[in-house]
């Protein structure tokens, strides 16, 4: 059976490679023939290079990078890329929460609370990349574990420009794993179609995004002292959940201006185009739902049975329509200052589906909101600034607001560029629908929580040449909402404060390099949060080159956090809560890895959690009852094709 599965995997992998390569070659041939280029002429001689960008708020272009670097290539899990400490249910693609308080605070705002636990995995309009690709471009990434645990991660991307202005592409991502423990299988599929037309005056970008997760829900494992994953037993048998997120996004832009005549000298006149500004219209539709099913309600994981003793079929559903209009003024320059301002308005319609009579009688409530937006970015003497703000003037979100000001000072430190930035952020927001109202077989609540308030200050100092960054964070949080020891949402009426300081530094000595990061954090009310006081990451690797054909990093990495109360997880709601049933932390997670670049191909080989072999006589539990995988071998490869 294992051999058959392996053959099928290899067949699908190589078929995908061949198909994309064949498609790239054929499409490139067609483009070249359409443009009638000579055989000895490079197609991109007069064109910009391969470029990628995202659209902030659906209309502001932000250049995006390509993930082609060898360092830390073995860290392919989206959560690990952005967090040196987190708590998850163990399998790739499963729910998680960052143990770095300010990282969790950075999660995007959402009206649909269940997606918070999947924030890093989800492809959203804010993360959507658009491309200019003068020649067909394709990416293939494939990561896998040993066949016993059957973990797979596949990433396929193909994009090309039909001409200088029109681009299209498709992206597909798969994350799946049987899991090391029973009843922990996960599968996640992301399908994405995107296109863009960038004209001299008119531009349009569109994307369709579909994310779907299916997860077996185990409730963790029974604590019986067994340390063989094959012999452990789940606390729930037969339960599963699904999370679905669909987005359709269109952004249009038209640049306004006029042509004027400029007198160059007494005998020569020149006509130039004078821009006035640009108008953007953005439409976004999203559909979100989460379902939970279990035909056995007698498990001791369920404290209450409120509706049906036969089976559980719970559902939460939300739809949202956004219509946004923005006007961006032309650059204003005066002496040492340059400013770019934009204003806009957003009309939101939100349909929140609740189930008053359990799942048979759905009731939908529609909410309408109008939001005003103002943004400004520019330079003043030696400072760069960026200001973003919005305010809800009507609707159930009325008086919600956010204002973020970032100041950056660039200067030389020992003749190397250095950056000092200061960010002020203040916002007030209505609680998510699920925090206010929830009606299911095991949980029912109907709250009247106040709006949440946050005031935050961040300061960062960075010297890229030294690979060094220092960051300080402070926040005051009012009306903070958390899930209490019974897994019900609760609101802290008084405010509390949180602080953090972190240092990142890379050291290079000969052919060895060491990457290091340390975080200290503190919250003055530990009854509503549970975080480690100190978190560390350390990596040491040997750096080897063989001409230009081979480059490798051979090394190890260690993750460590001090001891703290482990969070618990409620499968029914999909939320982490302050159960305080177990301790976690105080356990060094050791990984061994080899990262390689051979020509244009990247590869890695990695042993995860090697420390389990000699440091523990029991499983390590990042979340109560949910153990971390024991030692596991993983392999990954990535190709990029550019014709």
Image (cartoon, rainbow, N blue to C red):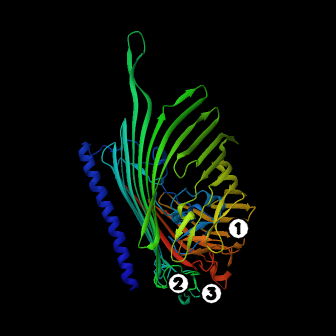
Upstream in sequence: badge 1 or badge 2: 2
Give residue 390's position: percent from left, percent from top. 55, 44
Give residue 534's position: percent from left, percent from top. 72, 65
Nearer the observer: mark 2 or 3; the answer is 2
In the displayed structure, does residue 367 sit left or right of residue 412?
left
Q: Is residue 257 visible?
A: yes
Determine the residue positioned at 42% across, 15% down: 264
Nearer the observer: mark 1 or 2; the answer is 2
Q: What is the spatial separation of the Cα atoms under label 3 and label 1, in whole angstroms?
A: 24 Å
Secondary element at tag 2: loop
Marks 3/1 in contact by CB < 8 Å: the verdict is: no
Q: Compared to 148, does 427 lie above or below?
A: above
Identify the mark at residue 223; answer none if there is no mark: 3
Q: What is the spatial separation of the Cα atoms under label 2 and label 3, in whole angstroms?
A: 13 Å
Q: Compared to 444, does 456 lie above or below?
A: above
Marks 2/3 in contact by CB < 8 Å: the verdict is: no
Q: What is the spatial separation of the Cα atoms under label 1 and label 2, in whole angstroms?
A: 29 Å
Determine the residue positioned at 51% across, 68% down: 604
Give residue 112's position: percent from left, percent from top. 50, 61
Local crowd size for mark 1, using a 10 Å CA cut-off: few (<14), some (14–19), many (≥20):
many
Residue matched to label 1 = 532
Marks 1/2 in contact by CB < 8 Å: the verdict is: no
Name the residue at the right extreme: 524
Give residue 566's position: percent from left, percent from top. 66, 74
């Amino acid at each position: 059976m294992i051999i058959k599965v392996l053959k099928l995997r290899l067949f699908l992998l190589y078929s995908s490679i061949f198909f994309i390569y064949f498609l790239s070659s054929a499409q490139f041939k067609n483009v070249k023939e359409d443009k009638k280029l000579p055989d000895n002429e490079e197609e991109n001689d007069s064109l910009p290079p391969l470029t990628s960008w995202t659209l902030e708020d659906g209309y502001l272009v932000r250049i995006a990078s390509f993930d082609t670097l060898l360092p830390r290539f073995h860290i392919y899990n989206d959560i690990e890329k952005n967090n040196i400490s987190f708590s998850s249910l163990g399998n790739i693609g499963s729910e998680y929460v960052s143990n770095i308080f300010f990282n969790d605070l950075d999660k995007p705002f959402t009206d649909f609370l269940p997606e918070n636990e999947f924030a890093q995995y989800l492809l959203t309009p804010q993360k959507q990349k658009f491309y200019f690709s003068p020649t067909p471009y394709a990416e293939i990434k494939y990561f896998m574990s040993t066949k016993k645990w059957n973990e797979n991660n596949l990433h396929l991307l193909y994009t090309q420009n039909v001409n200088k202005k029109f681009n299209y592409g498709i992206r597909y991502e798969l994350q799946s794993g049987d899991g090391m423990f029973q009843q922990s299988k996960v599968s996640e599929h992301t399908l994405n179609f995107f296109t863009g037309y960038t004209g001299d005056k008119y531009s349009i970008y569109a994307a369709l995004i579909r994310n779907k997760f299916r997860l077996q829900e185990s409730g963790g494992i029974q604590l019986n002292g067994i340390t063989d994953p094959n012999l452990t037993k789940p606390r729930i048998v037969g339960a599963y959940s699904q999370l679905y997120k669909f987005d359709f996004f269109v952004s249009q832009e038209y640049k306004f201006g006029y042509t004027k005549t400029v007198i160059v000298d007494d005998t020569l006149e020149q006509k130039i185009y004078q821009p006035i500004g640009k108008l953007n219209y953005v439409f976004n539709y999203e559909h979100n739902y989460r379902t939970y099913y279990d035909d056995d309600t007698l498990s001791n994981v369920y404290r209450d049975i409120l509706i049906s003793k036969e089976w559980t079929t719970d559902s939460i559903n939300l739809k949202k329509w956004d219509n946004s209009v923005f006007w961006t003024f032309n650059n204003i320059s005066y002496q040492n200052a340059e400013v770019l301002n934009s204003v806009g308005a957003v009309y939101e319609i939100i349909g929140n589906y609740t189930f008053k009579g359990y799942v048979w009688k759905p009731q939908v409530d529609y909410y309408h909101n109008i939001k005003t937006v103002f943004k400004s970015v520019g330079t003043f003497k030696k400072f760069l600034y960026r200001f973003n703000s919005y305010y809800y003037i009507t609707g159930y979100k009325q008086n919600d607001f956010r204002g973020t000001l970032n100041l950056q000072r660039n200067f030389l430190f020992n003749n190397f560029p250095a950056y000092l930035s200061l960010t002020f952020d203040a916002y007030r927001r209505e609680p998510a629908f699920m925090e206010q109202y929830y009606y299911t077989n095991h949980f029912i609540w109907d709250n009247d929580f106040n709006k949440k308030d946050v005031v935050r200050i961040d300061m960062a100092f960075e010297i890229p040449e030294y690979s060094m960054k220092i960051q300080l964070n402070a926040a005051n949080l009012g009306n903070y909402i958390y899930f209490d020891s019974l897994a019900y949402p609760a609101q802290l009426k008084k405010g509390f404060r949180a602080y953090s300081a972190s240092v990142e530094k890379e050291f290079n000595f000969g052919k060895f390099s060491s990457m290091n990061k340390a975080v200290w954090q503190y919250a003055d009310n530990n009854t509503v949060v549970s975080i480690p006081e100190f978190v560390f990451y350390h990596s040491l690797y040997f750096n080897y080159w063989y001409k230009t054909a081979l480059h490798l990093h051979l090394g190890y990495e260690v993750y460590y956090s001090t001891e703290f109360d482990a969070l618990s997880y409620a499968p029914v709601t999909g939320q982490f809560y302050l159960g305080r049933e177990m301790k976690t932390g105080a356990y060094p997670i050791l990984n061994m890895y080899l990262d390689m670049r051979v020509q244009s191909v990247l590869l890695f080989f990695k042993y995860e959690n090697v420390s389990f072999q000699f440091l523990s006589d029991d499983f390590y539990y990042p979340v109560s009852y949910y153990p971390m995988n024991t030692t596991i071998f993983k392999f990954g490869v990535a190709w990029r094709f550019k014709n």
